Every structure is written in structure tokens, then in C-alpha cells.
Amino acid sequence: MKRTWHDSHVFFIFIIMRKKRNYLIIISVFLLITILTIVIKNNNQNLDYYIEGEPKITLYLHQENEVIELGLEEYLVGVIAAEMPASFELEALKAQAIAARTYTIRKIIEGREYPLNADLSDNINECQAYISLDEFKKRNPKNYSELQEKLIKAVYETKGEILMYQNNEVIDALYHSTCGGYTESAEDAWGNHVPYLKSIKCVYCEKSRHYETEQVFSNSEFNQIFNINDAQLKIDILEKSNSGRIKKMKINNQIIYGDRLRNLLSLPSTWLGIEINEHEVIINNRGYGHGVGMCQYGTNGMAKEGYSYEEILNKYYQNIDIIKISY
Ligand SMILES: [Zn+2]
């Protein structure tokens, strides 16, 4: 498509040269093409995919084990329906739509293969959640049409908008439910430095029901999970991230990493404190999710205080640009 578009203009210039011999026009057209090419190249990593109208994507539905085809924006309505409460503020839903669109486009550019050769999957362990509007209706029987209208508005009023870093990278737009006060840097979470995924203070998610939670395990239950036979349970926290999340700890003689601990105990996050008493192990958690990138409840908190989706996105992803792709 890119070559055809460019060739047609070269041909056009050739005609002008023959008929008019107006060099000023030729130079102007060349300049215009050069500027347009630079702008489009900078704005799109995969130009061919975007410029011929709204892209279609294929989505693997993991429970049905089948693939459906959807328009990109149509798909995003189902993603934000599944990933964020539709009762959230419109600006929060718009921020979510852009984060989800960016995440989607990055996945497509990465070219990861999902089952049955689909572009994307609705399995949250490897991609984003998605629900059909029928499913959304079942989950919101009372005010379905009002909420659906809001979701569609959030997606279509931000149509084509994605987040880029330094105009040459579609960002890895990670998001999570509730950070608990500080987001986590990608470096602390996974060991790779990502300049737009830093740990930042968030005072906007305090109203989330996941902000502070408590999980209680009986000593025997805890000992069974960690295969501990000793009578005396001993826990030492060895390493924390800058945000306060646990990276490494010692449970009796076992070294346990934060993510492993979270998985084994099905904890909402790795930001936690542990108390042991005679009968129980009490874990006080902060936040819900990996904590990297956009805090969804924080997003809604910001929207309630009057921040725009641009301001919200620029808080949770640093030094990024919001770029609009035309299709
Ligand atoms: Zn937060």
C-alpha cells in the first residue's frame, strides 16, 4: 500500500513535469510528500496495517476454542467492558480505551501467535480480557443501554489514538486494578528497565476496595502450602522494591520470590506485610495486580477530580505522546 501510494505520486509528478514544466509545483509536491511520509512513518510502526480503513482483528475465544473476526474498535468496546467497571467516569474509560488499543496494536506488531492463528486472545493470562455485548448485558441487566453507550463513546471518541514513546515505539501499555499508593517500575517487577514504566506516587486509588486487604491462613494451611514440617514458622523479608513490594523472602529455609509467593497464596499483590501468631499467618496486602503502568482505580479517582484522559495517561506512563492513527 505504501509503495502504491508513493508510486502514484511519482507518476503524478512526472505528468506535471511533462505538461506544465512548472518546477515550483514539482518542488512543492516533493516537499509535501517528504513531510507526509516522515509524519506517517513516525506515527505508525506498521504503516501497511493502518491506512486502508479500520483494521480487522481475529480473536481467539479460549473457553469456546474458536476464532472470531472483529473491527479493532468493536473489539476494544468488549475489552474495556471486561477490563474496567463501566460505571467509571467517561475520562477513565477513555484512558482505558487508549491503553487497551495501544496494548492491542503492540501485540499485533510483535506478531505473537495465539491458538488457531488468531491475532489476539481473550485469555487474561496471555492477553486482555474481552466480553461480547450480550455478556455485558447479562452482567448489567438494569442499566445496560446507558452503560453500553458510555463504553462505545469512550472507544469511538478516542478512535485511532495510541501511546508512543519518542515517536518510534508503540508502548507496552500495561495496566492493573489498584496500585495501593505507588505503582511499580517495570525494572523492579521484571528486571528490564522501561523508561515510561516508572514507579510513581498515586493518591487516587484509596477508594478502591482492593486498596488494603487482609488474608488469613491457619498455621497448618500455611505450612502445608510451603511444605514446612518444623513446628516453628520463621519468615524474613530479604528484598523489597523501591515501591515497597516484596522481591525476595525467606520462609524457614526456603527462598521465595515475590511473584511465586503471590501465586502460591493467591494474593492480590506482592506489596504486603506478614504477622504470625500462635494460630495464624495474617497477610496485609496493598493494591491488586502487578502494579506496573496505569492504575485503573487511580484513573477513575483522577477523572473524578476533573483530570482529562490525556493528563491521566501522562501520569501513569511517563514522557509518552498520544498519537492518532487515521483509518
Ligand atoms: Zn493507584
Image: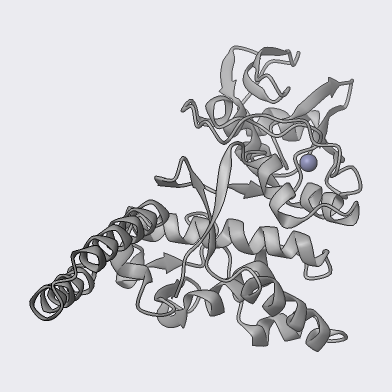
Residue 188 visible at all: yes
70 lies left or right of 282: left
Left or right of 306 in this view: 98: left
Depicted 166 relative to depicted 91: above or below: above
Q: Nearer the viewer, residue 45 or 223?
A: 45
Image spot of residue 57 (x, y percent): 41, 75
How many marks can you see?
A: 0
Ligand 1 quadrant in view:
top right
Above/below status of 242 relative to 144: above
Residue 226 in the image, given as x and y percentages of width and height: 62, 28
Give the quarter of the image for residue 4: bottom left
The residue lying toward the viewer, choosing from 243 and 327, is: 327
Looking at the image, the residue that sits furthest to the left is 18
Q: From what the image shows, is residue 44 above or below residue 153?
A: above
Nearer to the camera, 216 or 125 = 125
- Residue plotted at (73% across, 48% down): 311
Nearest the eye: 296 or 248: 296
Q: Position of residue 28 (x, y in %)?
A: 29, 62
- Image quadrant containing the C terminus: bottom left
Q: Position of residue 318 (x, y in %)?
A: 61, 36
Compared to residue 29, the image places residue 293 above or below, namely above
